[in-house]
Image (spheres, helix red, strand yellow):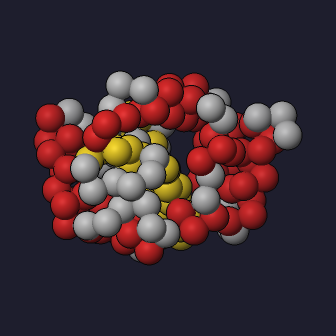
């Protein structure tokens, strides 16, 4: 599985206006609903918040990867948002979060698609140059080009 296989231009938000996790979850969750990937916004947000409560998805380096395996997810997908105004994901963070990559995976794919997608994204996002390109992107096309370039396409 390549990142480009699940890439959807409808799941990109450039300059997302969000001041906290709840606003991020709601805004990106709505993108997933609008794209037909999630059937119930409140149910999905509840699953993302439950996951977040068990262990923060802020991974440092200005990045957070919130995710949920949920029965309201119709198709495995991920959304990318760079924030208009970065904020501290957790109160003990050293650096504000500027980039959000949210994963949505159907419950029945928890051990397969979820792990593959999380692994692919994590490896790609460890590359500081790639991450910086996503943070600084001014258009969906720049995000798409960065992903394709990362995969050598």
Of residue 76 and residue 138, the one placed in the foreground of this image is 76
Which x, y percent locates residue 38?
36, 62
The C terminus sits in image quarter: top right
Q: Toward the viewer: 24 or 92?
A: 24
Residue 132 in view here: no
42 vs 100: above or below: below
Judge left or right: residue 146 versus residue 19: right
Comparing 137 with 118, the one in front is 118
Give coordinates of residue 62: x percent, y percent: 46, 44
Residue at 44% from the left image edge and 74% from the top image edge? 34
Res 71 seen here: yes
Which residue is painted at 72% across and 55% down in the image?
Answer: 144
Q: Is residue 11 above or below residue 149?
A: below
Q: Is residue 116 above or below residue 53?
A: above
Quarter residue 22 falls in: bottom left
- Position of 45 compared to 99: left or right? left
87 with respect to 75 (left or right)? left
The residue at 19%/67% (across/down) is 42
Image location of residue 20, percent across then percent down: 27, 62
């Amino acid at each position: 599985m390549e990142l480009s296989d699940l890439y959807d231009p409808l799941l990109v938000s450039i300059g997302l206006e969000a001041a906290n996790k709840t606003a991020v979850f709601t805004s990106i969750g709505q993108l997933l609903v609008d794209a037909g990937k999630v059937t119930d916004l409140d149910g999905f947000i509840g699953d993302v918040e439950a996951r977040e409560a068990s262990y923060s998805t802020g991974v440092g380096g200005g990045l957070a990867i919130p995710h949920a395996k949920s029965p309201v997810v119709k198709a495995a997908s991920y959304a990318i948002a760079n924030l208009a105004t970065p904020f501290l994901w957790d109160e003990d963070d050293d650096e504000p979060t500027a980039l959000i990559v949210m994963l949505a995976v159907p419950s029945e794919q928890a051990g397969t698609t979820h792990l593959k997608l999380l692994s692919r994204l994590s490896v790609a996002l460890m590359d500081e140059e790639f991450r910086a390109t996503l943070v600084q992107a001014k258009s969906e096309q720049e995000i798409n080009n960065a992903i394709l370039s990362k995969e050598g396409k």
